[in-house]
Image: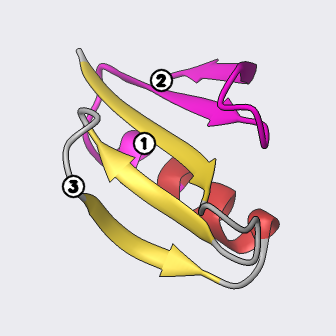
Amino acid sequence: MKEYSVSPNKDVTGWFVKIEDVAPTDEYDERDTAIAKAKEMAEHNKPSRVLILDKNHEVEDEIKY
């Protein structure tokens, strides 16, 4: 199962989308945009899941596809 995560940058001024917790693939200004992109990638690569992390890098939500 592939894992995608959405997490804030150090200053919480942008949001990273990571695949398998490796180097970030993209950075977005808005959290909702980053979540939408991660969901789109996960849906195209089933089975997969999206982890949405808060500013403390704790799992806030998990979506499975």
Quarter of the figure with the N terminus: top left
SS at badge 1: helix
Q: Label 3 vs label 1: CA separation?
A: 20 Å
In this rendered view, identify the residue nearer to me: 3 or 56: 56
Q: Amino acid at mark 2?
A: Tyr
- In the displayed structure, 45 sits above or below 51; it is below
Residue occupied by mark 2 = 65
Segment tinted magenta in the rendering: 40-65
Residue occupied by mark 3 = 23
Disc 1 crowd rating (10 Å Cα; few below 14, some 14-19, many 20+) is some
Q: Amino acid at mark 1?
A: Glu
Q: Is label 1 in contact with label 2 (beta carbons under 8 Å)? A: yes
SS at badge 3: loop
Residue 58: x %, y % from top left: 70, 21
Disc 2 crowd rating (10 Å Cα; few below 14, some 14-19, many 20+) is some
* Quarter of the rendering containing residue 12: bottom right
Is residue 7 left or right of 1 when viewed as pictured? right
Residue 8: x %, y % from top left: 65, 56
SS at badge 2: loop
* Quarter of the rendering containing residue 45: top left
> Which residue is at a point 48% across and 39% down the rendered structure image?
5
- In the displayed structure, 55 sits above or below 48; it is below
Q: Label 1 vs label 2: CA separation?
A: 6 Å
Is residue 58 left or right of 28 when viewed as pictured? right
Residue occupied by mark 1 = 43
Q: Amino acid at mark 3?
A: Ala
Q: Tag 3 or tag 2, which sits nearer the N-term?
A: 3
